[in-house]
Amino acid sequence: MTAVDQPPIIIPDAAEAPEEKRRRRPRHIRGSRPGWFVYASLGVVLLAAFFPYYWSLLIGSGDAYTIRDPNMSWLPGGNFFANAASVVNDPAVNFWPALWNSIYSSALIAISVVFFSTLAGWAFAKLKFRGSSILLVFVIATMAVPTQLGVVPLYILFSEIGWTGQIGAIIIPAMVTAFGVFWMTQYLRQAVPDELIEAARVDGASSFRTFWTIGVTAARPAAAMLGLFTFVTAWNNFFWPFIVLDRSNPTLPVALSLLQSNYFVDYSVVLAGVLLSTIPLLILFIFAGRQLVSGIMQGAVKG
Amino acid sequence: MTATVSPPTTKGGSGATRAPKRIGFGKSLSSWDLKLSPYLYISPFFILFLIVGLFPIAYTAVISFMDWDLVRNSGTFIGFGQYEYVLSNPKFWIALRNTFSIFLLSTVPQLILAIFIAAMLDQNIRAKTFWRMGVLVPYVMAPVAVALIFSNMFGDKYGIINTLLSNIGIPAIGWHSNAFASHIAIATMVNFRWTGYNALILLAAMQAIPRDYYEAATVDGAGKVRQFFAITVPSLRPTLIFVIITSTIGGLQIFDEPRMYDQYGTGGANYQWLTITLWLYDIGWGEWNFGRAAALAWILFIIILLIGVINLFVTRSLVRDEGSRSSMTRAERRAAARNARRAVAADSAQQARTREEAAR
């Protein structure tokens, strides 16, 4: 166990270098602070980004007639908790099971994608083996295959083994992604110097041990981001869960879709449900939004 | 470097067990370890992909040539019948038109807006992280949730958009009854969710542009707007290509938003916003005709491949004449950058001198 308790290997993060360099430039080159136009346009963008959230709070805290009221107030009403309660208590929606299903399926998918992608990414980035470049091209090519192409046989397959309606049917197909493998390969390629692996090998470490002590340590930042993105994607996924799950055992997006399927749609209840189902991800965003931002920006440069 | 790596742990803990490992049996073992473990590491991906990726693709092709019987869970071979049915059905062409219309309406404005936002974020603004996180807020909302909110805002009768329009004297628009209007509404949902995300990707690309270019341009007297179109936009090309390709693959598969645009989810009374995937779902899990759904899935895949190939050719030609498009040759550019650096150095030397004098 000594290996695991070793202090983390410090690997210089190449991505941070240009930013550092830029910051050190004298002020008159960086340019002065921008004028009101920049802040005004960003303010408009921010307003547009938040407005739908506010709108759903506005309607979701009113009653069924709020939306038809021509003199509608721009302040939230007092009915949000009543509307939320009618979402939660709607027997057709199964809110609590849906919430739990979403949480644990997304978490399992994220963990599995991160683990298998790190493993495969390590092999593609740092180990030499016959056919590695061809196989990597194959992995990348699979990203262009649309989900729709596989849904019919997958549905047949899962109904053969009696898994339709089971959460397992949405976890299994999502356990590895080509994007994840590609992402980890790109990251590990620049994050770990080859001499380090060479040194570990000379010292007699086995292949898996090298992976575990060097690869996993170095991969941690990229793995965290991959996990976040996979979690968000899995949480929001609708097409396949909508096909394979049934009303009694849904995920949150599937449950949400049921809110609108009645003949008479009470939008105050629907939008209260929308807000309720978005709260968990908003909480995640408050804590991990910074990581999401830097994840998108790093992926852009390397991908 | 070696010091940072964990020491080799030999199971006995003594050097004696380690020595023979280097030569005899141990060596062949470790060479096997080296040869085999890479395959072991990538195997989970390939095994799972085989089961949930490759097998379904091949099997979809098989099913698409069959009339699938749900009760027996098997099919009878009928040749190209399903493809003929799909391609001769007017619904397919309507769905194709709608899919492309929504795709264009959600890609072109989105990219323009994303470049603009990225350019704003690339300025030397205060509270950078706050603004960057702010534009990403829509991304965490599920497409289903976005669709529910927007289908309410775009309501034909009581929607906020129509209310606002009538307040400024524009007659109400049939966001659901008119095909093109419904495409705009659905494209707006896509734009809402993805513009900020793409803006951050483009922002990263903008920050990778060497600042020397701007320095040189400033020295040459080019204004901010001129700099943006002469330096920023051409340098973004590879990233733009990446964004366009990913949004093509995603955009042609659009399902969540049109599905939730009304309470029936069948694409409207006259199929105003029926998309290919929406129709696929309807054939497969509404009519329970798996053979036909499989044929449509393959047609969709071929369309995506075709668009991808066209993309590739267009982008290749764009990338190739990137050099010739710019007004300066490389030598000129380098000279300009050198001049700019010299000017900057002289400038800062000057400043240092004045500062020294002031200190005295």
Image: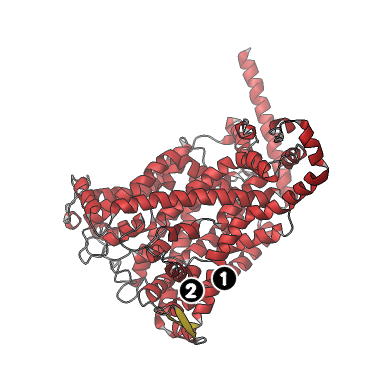
Q: Nearer the viewer, residue B155 or B349?
A: B155
Three-letter code, disc 2: Ala
Residue lying furthest right in this view?
A: B23
Amino acid type shown at disc 1: Leu
Locate residue B326: give its quadrant. Answer: bottom right
Check disc 2: other Cα within 10 Å, few if <14, some if 14-19, many if 20+.
many
Tags 1 and 2 both on a single chain: yes
Position of A114 relative to A17 (above/below): below
Number of residues whose C-alpha sits closer than 10 Å to that of mark 1, classed few (under 14), some (14–19) or many (20 or more) = some
Does residue A148 appear left or right of residue B153 in this picture?
right
Label 1 marks a residue whose chain is: B
Question: Which residue does the image show at 48% across and 73% down from the upper left?
Answer: B297
- Spatial separation of the CA atoms under disc 1 and disc 2: 12 Å
Task: Where is residue B246? Give x, y as percent.
Answer: 53, 60
Number of the label disc, if any, that sits on residue B305: 1
Q: Position of residue A88 (x, y in %)?
A: 25, 51
Determine the image quadrant of residue A130. Answer: bottom right
Side of A265 where A107 appears, left or right: right
Q: Please tell me the numbered disc located at residue B297.
A: 2
Which chain letter goes with mark 2? B
